[in-house]
Every structure is written in C-alpha cells, then in structure tokens.
Amino acid sequence: MDPLSTIEGRAIPYGAKNVDTDVIIPAAWLKTITREGLGKGAFETVRAQPGNVFDDPEFAGAPILVAGDNFGCGSSREHAAWALLDLGIRAVIAPSFSDIFSGNAFKNGILTVELPQDQIDRLLEIARTDPVTIDLDTQTVTTPYQDRFPFDIDPFRKQCLVDGIDEIGLTLERDAAIAEYEKRQARDRPWLATGTEKHI
Amino acid sequence: MVSKPRTLYEKIWDAHVVETRENGTSLIFIDRHLVHEVTSPQAFEALRLAGRTVRRPDLTLAVPDHNLPTTPRLGASGEKIAIADPQSAAQLAALEANAPAFGIRYIDATAPQQGIVHVVGPEQGFSLPGATIVCGDSHTAAHGGIGALAFGIGTSEVEHVLATQTLLLKQSKTMEVRVDGTLGPGVTSKDLILHIIGTIGTAGGTGHVIEYRGPVFERMSIESRLTVCNMSIEAGARAGLVAPDEKTFAYLKGRPCSPAGEQWDRAVAWWQTLHTDKGATFDKSVRIDAEAVEPTVTWGTSPEDIAPIGGTVPAPASFADPAKQEAARKSLDYMGLTPGEKLTDIEIQNVFIGSCTNSRIEDLRAAAEILRGHSKADTIRWGIVVPGSGLVKRQAEEEGLDTIFTDAGLEWREPGCSACLGMNPDKVPPGERCASTSNRNFVGRQGPGARTHLMSPAMAAAAAVTGRLTDVRELMR
C-alpha cells in the first residue's frame, strides 16, 4: 500500500446518510476478477440521476469523499472499498461508519475520518469551491479558511497507514515466528505439515 | 502439573498459536486452505501486485465449484465445453491460471475429483481432525464434522493466508449444543440442525464456536456430522465441531491425502486426545431432546423460520419480538403464504437435491430410497440431483441411484454448487417454490423472486413425488 501522510485536494460533497454497500457498489458488479475497474460501478444508482456530484467535472479525481452518518452499512463485501479506491478516493470523512466498512477500508489503505455533523456541514459547504486537507500526522482536517478539525484514529491503524504497511506486511515481518511454528509442527504433527504433495 | 480442563475448541486453538499479541489477538497457523473461483481472484491479483508469493502452496488446494454450470463439461470428442456466461468463464479461467502460477494443486473442472470444496476436502483426506481449515466461503464450517476447526474468511483474509499461512484472530467463546435421546424414523441430521437453528436463532451462536455433543452426534455418521456443522454459520457461529472418534478415523483411513503408516498411528494418537475434558466449561450451553425433532421444513426467508412438517404457517403475531413479527410479515409476503395454512398443502414446482450441505452419497441414497419406483408429480416442472463431487457421482452411478432419479423424472447433473446460490445457470424462476436441500432460504438466494423451502434429501424426494411439502414418513417403506 502507498504510505499515507497528507491527503490534499478536492472533496466530493456527497453528504448522504446511511449509504449502504449496495449503493457504493451494486451486487451485479461482484462477479469480477480484479479489484480495479469497480469505479465504473461505484454509486451507479446515484450517478443515474442528472446533476449528481460524482459526475461533476469539478470533482473529477477528488481524493476525498464527505458523507453522512453510518457510511458503508450493509454487507461485508470488500468490493465497496475497492470501488472507492478505483474512483481515486483515499479518505472518507463522515460522522460515523459501519465497523465492517471501516475495517475493509483500512485493509485497503483508505482513511476513514469521523467528525461531528456541524463540521461535516461546514466541509460540505467549503468543498463546493475549495480543496480540503487531511494531515494524518497531526490528525487534523483543514480548509483554506482557517478551519481546523482534529480527529481520532486507532494508533495501530495510523501507524499502518503512515508506513504504508498492510496487515499482511506486518505479519510477514513475523516470518521467523511462523517458520519456528512450522518447524514445531513438522516435528510434532508431521502429517499436518504435508498437504497436497501426497497424491490426489 | 495438572493442566486446566479445556474444551475441544480450546485444544485446537492452543495447538495453532504462533504468537499472542498484547491486544489479545493471536497469530494462528492455518493447516489447510481451500480455494475456489469466486473469492480468490482479487487475492491472487493483490499478491501479484505486491510481488508476494504463496507461503505454503502445499497446504492449499484449489477447485472450482460456485460458477460452474452442472451440465456436461466435455463434448462428444472429449473437448472441454466453454462456459457461456463470460464473467463466470473469466473467474474459472483466473483460477485455472492462478493455481499453477502460484504452485497450488488445482483440481480441474473436468477431473473426477472435482466437486464442491466442502465435499472434496474431507473426501480427499485433505481435511483432517484437529486441523485449522479456512476457505473464502462461510460454509467452511462443514469440515468441523471431522473434528477440524474450520471457518469462512473474506478476500483480504484469503490473501493473508496465501501470503503468510496464518490469520490474526481473537479467540471465540465456546458454546455446547447437547442433544440427548434418539432421532425418530425419517428424522435426519438436516432436520436436527434446522431444529437447532430454530431453537437458538440465527444469532444464537454469534461470537461462539459450537461443539455438538451427546449420544445423537456420537451415533451419527461422518457425512451427517458434516451436514450439521455446515449450517453452524446459519446459527451465527463461525464454526461448529464434533469430536473425532473411531468413526472419523475409519472414514479418513486410506484417503488420498490422509496420513499413512507410522504417521497414521501418530495422528490417531493425537486425534484421540481431541475431546472436551471432563470439568471443562462452555460459555453457553443448550440442550435439545432428540425425540422432539420432527421432519422439519422452513416456511420463511431465514433459516430460523422452521416448523415441523405436520404444522402450519405461523401468524406473525405469534412471535413475541416486534422485530421478528415484522420480519415474519415480510417473509410471508415474499413466500406467498398465509398464516394457518397447512404446510403439507403448500405446492412445489421445483426440487433441488444437492449443495455442500446435502450432496454426499448418504444424502443421495436417502433421496433415492424414497424415489425408487415413483415418478415426480406432474406439477413438478424442474427437479435436479447434483452430486457433491465426481467421486460421489461415480459411486451413485455404481449403485444405480442415477437411474432411480432419472426414472423418476429428475435430472442427474455434474458436481457443483448449482441451485444453492443462483450464481450459475441453475436457478429457480421468480414466484416459484423449490424444495431444496441447501442451506439458505434468503430472499433471492436461488434466483430473483425464488421461494425456497429448506429440508432433508428424503423430504425433498417426498415433495418431488407428491408435488407438495410432504411428511416423508408417509412414503417410507
């Protein structure tokens, strides 16, 4: 994953509440074989409406999405995070997120920032015309108008995002411990240490 | 030193801890990883993008099942028949390419060993007692029937296991489901697990690993135990377990990947220690009387919506919980049923015998036993029997079961997930009912608008004969 420190750019002023994973990426898009390309299906039903923010050229390539309460509720499909990433979104700012969605977002290097509704309202207004900056290091969201909104983040998640390390990267750093376990297993339960090399 | 009494789950967990972290999570070693075409492509793609390899291809087995049509896969001159749906074809092609590229053993769609992952694993002796087994599919819980700790995982976790052969997990709570007594004639493991889900609810096992205990499970065949554990996830539990015993050892002996010789003896010696110690405690305990279990069917759109076949469609008002009342109203509306209607008056247009829950030889024998000498009712428009694997298919054909099915007017298909999940061409038409031996009766599960009634293979066979939900005991010889 790419290390994340400062995200600066236009923010899509979406603002909708209770956006579920079917809205983020409809089920018809689940029969894919790549994580890429899902951006085309992202917010498909929203984009069917004329004048929607996602197709507004003003926000093309925007790295930030500002949304309402309970963003990402519904199913556990990781395709929701992949679809946002494919749109170029690296951070979502909302009053709250579903647990599963924010876990999936984190696993895919997307920062989820929780801010109170009044600050969200202010960002929705400013985002229409101006860029927004998220500084992960100082844990603040700022605007060109002296707005400065601090946010909380789990220290483990912060570290992973800043270093660009995913969970797999962290586990791979435990290679020696895993190798030690494999050695123990080969000694104590050798029949489990061998699998398909025996003939099927 | 006397160690603290432990449950079976705790013993398997302890044997797989690589290390425990300060925040209470443990890095758990995964002994067996089953891979299929639907939840793996993005995991392989991510490995490739990150320049990572599969740590233990030898502990990984790939086999396609979800998307495959169950129509013949080889043409008249032995050529492979292409899959018509381009997206399904692409998912299959991705697995066919990814498995060898990462050094993983791949069972081809046309190989005799091909089948549903959860049928293939135990059948090949790849799934073993005391092993940790994962797959990107929630019905992985099935393998608990041979005493393995088995559970479904998401695509990021599939990638994590491929790359590291481990998962970061928090230990689950333990739950005992004890069934005493004896199941009556015509009452099977499927009726029992539906009854259990109806008793504890679809969230009854949430956060827990269930151990099924007591004389009923001890007497049960391995295939029936696989059926019970398979549906643990429908009770909210990530995994279900039955302690391995002599039956388990006899089932596994001589299978292609089972240990042999001196290793077999060592394995059995360890497996014999895999039971809950006297004095060990469970976080939750449920007791069920086997005599209270009748042949059971579902009436709604949740696996907990069950009733004995002699019963009626319930009134939403009969439920205490207002949320359940509302859910029942929606269910009945979707299912096109009226409260008070006798279950045995409900007419069926489709029959599906198959899925990772009920497609093993024992299931096919039970269905054939009811169908022998009968034809399907004229009102049954579509009935298919889908064996769980090529080896099950071959065995059934040797026993002449295929002829019993086709003589009855049912179709005999190639192995795969089929009409369990509406992802391949086998679908139930909108508004029609299906007597199904699968595991989920969710809205749209068997196709948009399809109405699913879950039941045992014998009960589905009985419904095929009469064209309505039927008490199998009336047809038993």
Image (spheres, coloured by chain):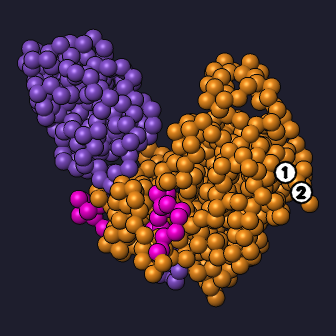
Label 1 is placed on what type of residue?
Val
Chain letter matching colour orange: B
Q: CA distance from mark 1 to mark 2?
A: 6 Å
Question: In this image, B201 relative to B78: left or right?
Answer: right
Image point (37%, 26%), residue name? A19
Q: Most extreme residue toward the bottom, as rendered?
A: B261
> On the image, numbered disc 2 is attached to which residue?
B476
Subunit ID for the residue under disc 2: B
Circle 2: element type: loop
Q: Is residue B183 visible?
A: no
Which disc number belongs to residue B472?
Answer: 1
Marks 1/2 same chain:
yes
Above or below, B397 against B71 in this view is below
Report x, y in % for residue B263.
Answer: 61, 83
Residue B65 or residue B379, whichever sits in front: B379
Q: Residues within 10 Å of mark 2 (few under 14, many from 20)?
A: few
Q: Is residue A117 visible?
A: yes
Q: Which residues are magenta?
A: B47-75
The colour with which the image depicts chain A is purple
Question: Which is the main secondary structure of the residues drawn in magenta?
Answer: loop
Which disc number belongs to residue B257?
Answer: none
